[in-house]
Image: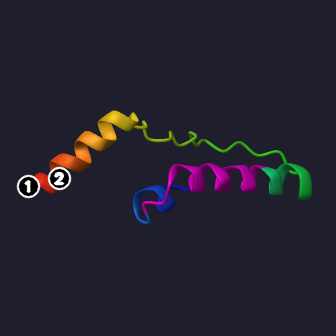
Amino acid sequence: MTMLAVERKVASSTQNQTLSALLFLYSRVLKVKIMIDALRAKTPEQLSEAESRNRSKLSFDR
């Protein structure tokens, strides 16, 4: 999990899906209780449409 986040820099949704898949595999398929000491990745904060337009305009003005 750490490799995905640090080295591969995958999206937070990919990290969360990987964690969910591992938890499902161990709990439902293998019937093994495990404790994974991992935090769910946070999705980045979305810009409002107006902020997004302003930032786009600024980058084109440079």
Q: Nearer the viewer, residue 57 or 1?
A: 57
Q: Can the viewer see residue 31?
A: no
Circle 1 SS class = loop
Q: Is residue 15 magenta?
A: yes
Neighbour tally class for label 1: few under 14, some 14-19, many 20 plus, Cα within 10 Å: few
Across and down, in percent, residue 20 comes to 72, 49
Q: Are marks 2 and 1 in contact (CB under 8 Å)?
A: yes
Residue at 90 percent of width and 51 percent of height: 28
Give the quadrant of the N terminus: bottom right
Circle 2 SS class = helix
Residue at 24 percent of width and 44 percent of height: 55
Residue type highlighted by circle 2: Ser
Q: Is residue 19 magenta?
A: yes
Q: Which residue does the numbered mark 2 point to in the structure image?
A: 59
**Range drawn in magenta:** 9-23
Q: Main secondary structure of the magenta part?
A: helix
Image-quadrant location for residue 22: bottom right
